[in-house]
Amino acid sequence: MTPIVETRGLTKRYGPFQALEELNLTIEPGVVFGFIGPNGAGKTTSMRILATLLEPTSGEAWVGGYSVSREPKSVRQVIGYMPDNFGVYDNMKVREYLDFFAAAYGLPRGRRLGLIDDLLALVDLSEKKEGYVEALSRGMKQRLCLARTLVHDPQLLILDEPASGLDPRARIELRALLRQLGALGKTVIVSSHILTELADICDHVGIIERGRLLASGSITEMLRQVQTNRVVLVRMIADARMSDEDIAGRVRSIGGVLDVAIEPLASTPRGAPAAVAMEATRARALSQIIPGEGPPPPHLQPVPAALPVDMLGVSSVEQRLVAVAAVAPARMVRIEFDGDDYRLYQLLGELLTRGLPVYGFTEEVGDLEDAFMRITRGMVA
Amino acid sequence: MTALAADSATPAATPPPSDEQSPGWVRAQGMLAKELRGRMRGPRAFVVLSLYLLFLVGFTLLIYFLAKLSATSNPATPIGKPVFLGLVAFQLGLVCFLAPSFTAGVISGERERQTYDLLMTTPLSLTLIIAAKLFAALAYVFLLIIAALPLLAISLFLGGVAPEEVLIAFLMLFASALLFGTVGLCFSAWVRSTIGAAALAYGAMLIPVVALPIVAATGFSFLAAILSSNNTTSPGLAAAVYYIGGFILSLNPFIAGGLTEAIIAANKSLFFFTLSSPFGSGSGTVFAIGPWIIYTVMALLGTVFFFLLSLRLSRPTRGGGGRRRGPAAQP
């Protein structure tokens, strides 16, 4: 598949300042690509070059197969660009604003009328159609600008910090809109400082610092790349028969385990019917794993009368477990582990074989912020 | 959403049906409509035009009564002439003042409003953008000039003014508007702030309007005095001094207009004429072109020059500081 964006050795200097250094980037069609980097890293410079607003000092970039230096007019037909800071025209209505840009792309009048209605509906601004653009809120202006980028149905959207300066509601709305565009099959390049937002909407990211692209690829790949060992979070139901040391010892004896850390779970259910019901369900599952043999632990208390356990229809063994869960804190065991997916499966089996009261087993996947911090600190080559 | 998704399936580059307008025409219409709407919408344009005409009527009445008073001592003097000259001089001053101020914000204003990048990433050609902006800015100046036509017509009725004088005046007014408008446009493309662009445009406008005639008139008078006192002046030198001095003086619209009036008063041709012994006897005969022609032609050439310069300065990648090291292979 021909990439929608490709850069080779893209370099940009402003006098002695090196804004971009030998940027080699490939973005496939249909990808929502997040451009991450600190201020002055070169994100805006890269985007402005791709938008034909800036000439590179050296190197070359292609958008939709067209060279941004030699075929800027063709590139402009392919892209929809939204800069980080933009203004609107005075004395212009929302409908006229979109109509002007649609006409700028040569769309005939008959086609423009319906298109404007569709775009305004997409960005939820239909009610403002006859309003003046300067009277719109910042969030509305952002959405209008996004609609403007779509008037000619571009293959690629280049959005530079589209959520900057927006209030939380406007951010959420914009994020939902970007997800919709991704679902429509648009290729989107979006930069933001808020990495959690990017993680939510992007499937690929590029991390840039001091003009150099440090890493690029799918988020999953990148997170795997930055994580040296796997981390498994195991939730264990409260069982006073086992001390923390006992649990740690049993876990450490399993092959591949590198480190173990145990902490109490903060969210222990305490009498709330819904929480008790949840624990009862877990207990029901647990009772199939741990038979009721052996002497009952001395701390076990009868189920408090206030708890609607009878209503849940659980057996006496389950009731005891529910009671334990209701009165004692559960544990979270963090296991650092070295091994592939098969070894991970074996780890779960080993935990259960060693009589550990496991009711939750998840692999901790690092987030984009972790990846960003590690990569920009030079932890990944 | 559904409509957009459906629309997405249709390539943007689909050629329009034959009964539809061409994309180029659609773009030009859209750009012009946007610029004219921005200029003319709201009460400001109407109020300014009304106030301008009221002021002009007052000014015309003032000249009329002053001319009437002076005509009592010399009844042979037609009243129409001073009314006409006063109105044209006033309009010329207005054009010199208004045209740069109207165009000084067309590019810098886009940059200040942060709308320039949005415009530059559309397929609109830079020539179309700049031409539409210039046209819209000057359309209002042209409107002010044309709005004064009924008042100029009164001077025709009052006598002493030929229709060709009115035509020449209009030509010079339009040429001045174009020249000073493109000067403002040029500075607007060069300087980031509109105030800075306007200040520079006024500074540039003062060169031909104020500085040049003072320097040229002083130098020309000095040389003419020397040549007139010297009986051995060769006709070639006299002609050279006459042409250079006359050319420089004709670059000023007020002087060019005044000289044209003097030529009309001397019953010479409006286009070409000969002048015998311009610097006293023995300095030969020079073949001269009407000063209004020199001014109009130079103003139009200046317009083309400043327009092209504006195009160059408006390029979004201007000052990008870079050329590609070498062509890379197409992927």
Image (spheres, coloured by chain):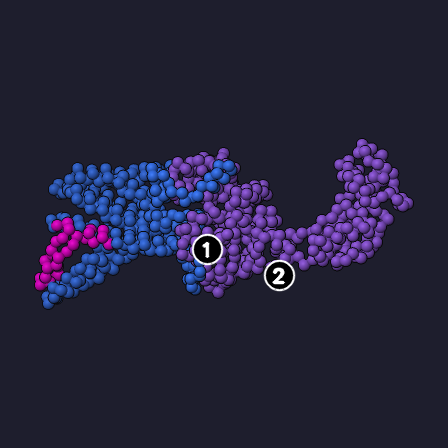
**Which residue is rendered at x = 14% and y = 63% of the image?**
B238
User: Is B16 drawn above or below residue A260 in the view shown?
Assistant: above
Is residue A112 located in the magenta-colored stretch of the structure? no
- Residue type for callout 1: Trp
In percent of width and height, residue B255 lies at 22, 52
Q: Nearer the viewer, residue A339 or A159?
A: A339
Label 1: which residue?
Answer: A62
- How busy is the neighbourhood of tag 2: few (under 14 within 10 Å), some, or many (20 plus)? few
Identify the chain of the residue marked 2, using the numbered disc in the image.
A
- Residue type for callout 2: Val
Q: Which residues are the magenta region? A: B269-298
Label 2: which residue?
Answer: A380
**Which residue is rendered at x = 49% and y = 34% of the image?**
A127
Does any portion of residue B149 appear in the rendered image?
yes
**Which residue is rendered at x = 34% and y = 50% of the image?**
B127
Chain A takes which shade in the image? purple
User: Is A367 drawn above or below residue A133 in the view shown?
Assistant: below
Query: Element type at marker 1?
Result: strand
- How busy is the neighbourhood of tag 1: few (under 14 within 10 Å), some, or many (20 plus)? many
Query: Residue A53 falls in which quadrant of the image?
Result: bottom left
- Measured in 3D between alpha carbons, the distance from the residue under mark 1 to the one under mark 2, in whole angstroms, is 28 Å
In percent of width and height, residue A162 lies at 53, 47
State which chain is coloured blue: B
Identify the chain of the residue marked 1, using the numbered disc in the image.
A
Which residue ends up furthest to the top in the rendered image? A311
Of tags 1 and 2, the one toward the viewer is 1
